[in-house]
Image (tube, rainbow, N blue to C red):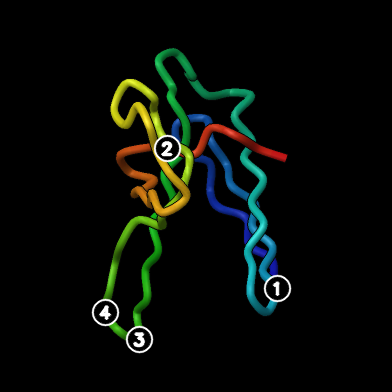
Amino acid sequence: MRFTSTKLSGYRVHAVTGVNTVSFAIDFREADTKGLLGFAVERHDPTENQRYFMTGMKVFESVIPKPDEKTVVSTYDHPIQSFV
């Protein structure tokens, strides 16, 4: 399934879903990115009536100076900064 969002504040998100994954493309050419630290991903499950931010493993060193392999954080607090 493919989805393209409406443009909001200069951002537009394109998503392609598979069986177990979702790939995102973020168009920010017209957005004001001054002060942007990264992106949080919020999941909304209407069936279970749940909303939560997805987790990640990369952290801000100033907040968690020595993360280990068990460190899991909310993308709300530690936004995604790396893209492929």
Between circles 2 and 1, the one closer to the viewer is 2
The residue to which callout 3 is attached is 47
Q: Considering only order in the chain, which callout, 2 or 3, is on the residue closer to the N terminus?
A: 3
Circle 3 Cα neighbour tier, 10 Å, few/some/many (<14 / 14–19 / ≥20): few
Gap in Å between the C-alphas at discs 2 and 1?
A: 23 Å
Left or right of 2? Residue 28 is left
Give the farthest residue toward the top: 34
Amino acid type, label 2: Pro
Image coordinates of residue 79 in percent, x first then y, are: 42, 37
- Is 67 placed above or below 4 here? above
Q: Which is nearer the eye, 75 or 48?
A: 75
Residue 22 spot, x, y in % from top left: 63, 63
**Residue that carries the numbered disc 2 in the rendered image:** 79
- N-terminal-most mark, 4 or 1: 1
Question: Measuring 58% from the left and 23% from the top, which residue is drawn there?
Answer: 30
Res 18 label: 1
In the rendered view, tell whether residue 84 sits above or below residue 51: above
Number of the label disc, if any, that sits on residue 84: none
Relative placement, left or right, of 84 versus 5 is right
Amino acid marked by disc 1: Gly
Q: Is mark 2 on a helix, strand or loop?
A: loop
Residue underneath mark 4: 49
3 or 1: mark nearer the eye = 1
Q: Disc 3 versus disc 1: distance between alpha carbons?
A: 19 Å
